[in-house]
Image (cartoon, rainbow, N blue to C red):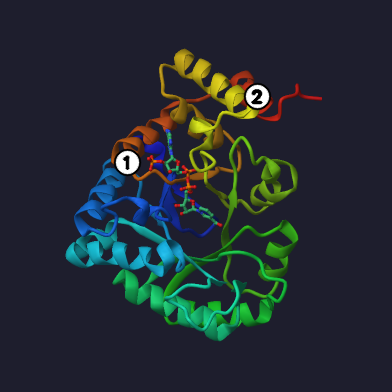
Amino acid sequence: MSETMRVTMAPGGPEVSRLAYGVWRLLDDPDGADPARVLAKIEACLECGITSFDHADIYGGYGCEEAFGAALKQHPSLRQKIEIITKCGIMLVDPARPQNRIKHYDYSKQHIIASVERSLANLHTDFIDIVLLHRPSPLLDPDEVAGAFHQLRDQGKVRHVGVSNFTPVQLDTLASRLDIAIVTNQVEIHPFQLDAFLDGTLDQCLQRRIAPMAWSPTAGGRVFAGDGPADLRVRGALDELARKYDASPDQILYAWLLKHPSGIIPVLGSNRPERITSAARALDIDLDIQDWFAVWVAATGSEMP
Ligand SMILES: NC(=O)c1ccc[n+]([C@@H]2O[C@H](COP(=O)([O-])OP(=O)(O)OC[C@H]3O[C@@H](n4cnc5c(N)ncnc54)[C@H](OP(=O)(O)O)[C@@H]3O)[C@@H](O)[C@H]2O)c1
């Protein structure tokens, strides 16, 4: 296991792994709900030092937390080896939530607390390491969120809080009402989604010394399966660097994200234990600066200005 796998996400914690594993697609796996299959993925992660697991209440039609929790229930000693991140706020139209007539967001104190309490029950745990607000809402009232976060923290149900898909101003506004630190902003980052590098999102993380989390780091697999011109350019660049570094193209992609000074934590989404294990080797690859820009230029299709 690489020694650099443990990191402190923000001043004052928490400690997490440099790569996280996301469970959004857990139930896409044909055996996804089988606790033995869930356990195989948790073990693949732990073997290579990945200890941080990214959930949301809504994943798998509100079913992923429960599937993961069933594996934890069978193996309770796992809980102390992992960090659990989960999210709240998105309200899906789903048979599990018949009261939702339209997809919307709810950040009322009552909903945040109820959602976290459901997550605790689903995951068979008495605390969440980090709870994230899943997406900003036009109706989000930071004082209301503060009331929920402070209560959950005081009750020991949540240790840390963060946000996801927030703009820098949205994050600052929420932070201005909290007496608990925001420890991350989880945003979409991959070669076809470079906004976070340019719109102040990663600069804010640098400013606050908090590590961002990158969701869909392979663009949902598009980096390795797409056949558009940008896909082919990026794949060509990754293949060439894979040969140079004696690595696989996905290891190069993760190394590309890891290189950013904000300490981006890629959230892996593969359902294949061997891909999870292989990804961890990315930590041993230090991309040369010009190689980093070669991926950027392949992604944008134009040379640096
Ligand atoms: N905060 C948010 O709003 C938000 C939104 C979306 C996702 N997320 C989080 O981010 C996590 C990761 O997102 P994601 O699942 O979209 O990640 P991803 O890695 O971009 O996509 C995973 C998909 O790509 C495929 N894939 C991965 N590596 C591959 C490779 N080397 N070659 C070919 N295909 C490959 C996987 O197939 P196999 O399973 O066959 O390997 C899987 O279908 C989620 O689980 C969730 O925790 C958060």
Mark-to-mark CA distance, 2 and 1: 27 Å
Tag 2: amino acid: Ala
* Of residues 199 and 90, the one drawn nearer to the viewer in this rendering: 90
x 41%, y 38%: residue = 4
* Of residues 191 and 25, the one drawn nearer to the viewer in this rendering: 25
x 49%, y 32%: residue = 225
Residue under pointer 2: 298
Secondary element type, mark 1:
loop
First in sequence: mark 2 vs mark 1: 1
Tag 1: amino acid: Arg
* Of residues 95 and 109, the one drawn nearer to the viewer in this rendering: 95
Residue 186 x %, y %? 57, 54
The reply to whether residue 2 is in sight is yes
Residue 251 x %, y %? 44, 29
The reply to whether residue 156 is in sight is no
- Ligand 1 within 8 angstroms of badge 1 C-beta: yes
* Image disc number at residue 272: 1
Residue 144 x %, y %? 64, 82
Classed neighbour count for the residue bearing mark 2: other residues with Cα under 10 Å, few (<14), some (14–19), many (≥20): many
Give the vertical position of 245 relative to 231 (above or below). Answer: above
* Image disc number at residue 119: none
Secondary element type, mark 2:
helix
